[in-house]
Image (spheres, coloured by chain):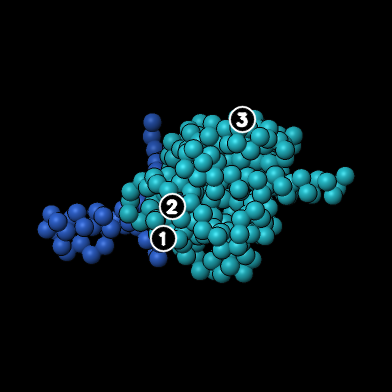
Chain colours: A blue, B cyan
């Protein structure tokens, strides 16, 4: 069994109004050193051992987990003991 | 003319759409559940607004993987009219039937009000009964209607005359005020404003009815010519 940690982030150049609102809130808490905030998603998958694990994860990300028009993704694979 | 109104779990404008077709337009329409796989008996396909699958992950992302979407693609390839409104537009984008993607509104607010929309092209099956450049009033109701595409895609949209509707006063941050786009062939339209909510003067506007009348009139013409 593998634990796959998928991180989905907005592409550079895509405006992130949510991140901007968070940055402003941080500034109002006097964390004015924060210049930019970008919000992304973290998705955890528990995946059975199968051939072409990485190829299939890439496909999952391209087809559903991320939208390649606006988002980038990367992932980490860990062996998981259950 | 016989329309299919595709219903996803979480659709909430499906009944408005059915009402617009059967009562205001006086044509036939039936609900088709998202697990169905055949849309061939229908002359036009309507993807209504709402929050399919709770808008989890991204608006329209899960709806786009529903079994019915293969059938939508097949009928679109035959040249039948396919209209996606609001969440229906988001599903068409996620399914790759239209280019681009939706982002959260720039203001982060859900916006629900009537708004001025410009008809940019009236030589399509969806807009032929409007005047070129006409400003119409339609309701919008969305939190993620901020249309995004890269410069290359925008140039292609312009080059192929795929931009049918733009906002007079951009409410959500959409690239180049885009409110509605069609595919290159011109038979798949996605739009954020709700024409199905503007089909009776009693409810404020009939500007949406004109869109449905355009579809029917073009369908009638091509079917009279073919027989």
Q: Secondary structure at mark 3?
A: strand
Helix, strand or loop at disc 2? strand
User: Quick check: do tags 3 and 1 share a chain?
Assistant: yes
Q: Residues within 10 Å of mark 3 (few under 14, many from 20)?
A: some
Q: In the displayed structure, would residue A20 be above or below residue B225? A: below
Residue, disc 1: B169
For the residues labelled 1 and 2, the Cα–Cα distance comes to 8 Å
The residue shown at (40%, 65%) is: A13
Residue linked to disc 3:
B31
Residue at 76% of width from left, 45% of height from top?
B220
- Left or right of A42 on screen, residue B31: right
Looking at the image, residue A54 lies above or below residue B4:
below
Disc 1 crowd rating (10 Å Cα; few below 14, some 14-19, many 20+) is few
The chain carrying label 2 is B
Which callout, 3 or 2, points to the residue nearer the camera? 2
Q: Is residue B108 left or right of residue B70?
A: left
Protein chain holding label 3: B
Label 3 or label 1, whichever lies nearer to me, is: 1
Q: Earlier in the sequence, mark 1 or mark 2?
A: 2
Separation (CA) of disc 3 from disc 1: 34 Å
Q: Residue at x 16, y 59 (%)?
A: A27
Between B122 and B66, the one nearer to me in the picture: B122
Tell me residue B136's x, y (percent).
51, 54
Q: Judge if badges 1 and 2 mark residues of a common chain.
A: yes
Residue closer to the observer: B153 or B164: B164
Label pair 1/2, CB-CB below 8 angstroms? yes
N-terminal label among 3 and 1? 3
Q: Residue furthest left?
A: A30
Mark linked to residue A14: none
Label 2 belongs to which residue?
B115
Question: Can the viewer see residue B56 in this picture?
Answer: yes
């Amino acid at each position: 069994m593998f634990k796959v940690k998928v991180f989905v982030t907005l592409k550079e150049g895509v405006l992130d109004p949510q991140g901007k609102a968070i940055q402003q809130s941080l500034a109002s808490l006097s964390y004015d050193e924060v210049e930019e905030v970008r919000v992304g998603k973290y998705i955890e998958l528990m995946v059975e051992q199968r051939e072409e694990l990485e190829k299939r994860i890439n496909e999952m990300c391209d087809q559903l987990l991320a939208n390649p028009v606006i988002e980038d993704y990367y992932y980490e694979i860990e062996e998981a003991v259950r | 003319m016989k329309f299919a109104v595709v219903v996803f779990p979480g659709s909430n404008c499906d009944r408005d759409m059915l009402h617009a077709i059967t009562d205001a337009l006086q044509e036939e329409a039936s609900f088709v559940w998202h697990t169905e796989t055949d849309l061939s008996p229908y002359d036009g396909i309507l993807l209504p607004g709402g929050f399919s699958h709770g808008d989890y992950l991204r608006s329209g992302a899960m709806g786009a993987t529903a079994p019915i979407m293969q059938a939508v693609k097949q009928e679109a390839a035959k040249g039948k009219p396919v209209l996606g409104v609001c969440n229906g537009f988001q599903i068409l984008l996620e399914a790759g039937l239209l280019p681009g993607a939706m982002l959260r509104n720039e203001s982060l607010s859900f916006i629900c009000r009537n708004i001025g929309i410009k008809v940019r092209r009236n030589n399509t099956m969806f807009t032929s009964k409007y005047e070129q450049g006409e400003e119409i009033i339609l309701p919008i109701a969305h939190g993620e209607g901020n249309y995004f595409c890269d410069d290359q895609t925008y140039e292609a949209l312009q080059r192929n005359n795929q931009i049918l509707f733009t906002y007079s006063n951009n409410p959500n941050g959409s690239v180049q005020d885009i409110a509605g786009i069609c595919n290159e062939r011109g038979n798949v339209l996605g739009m954020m404003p709700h024409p199905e909510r503007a089909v009776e003067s009693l409810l404020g506007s009939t500007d949406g009815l004109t869109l449905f009348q355009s579809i029917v009139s073009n369908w009638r013409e091509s079917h009279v010519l073919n027989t």
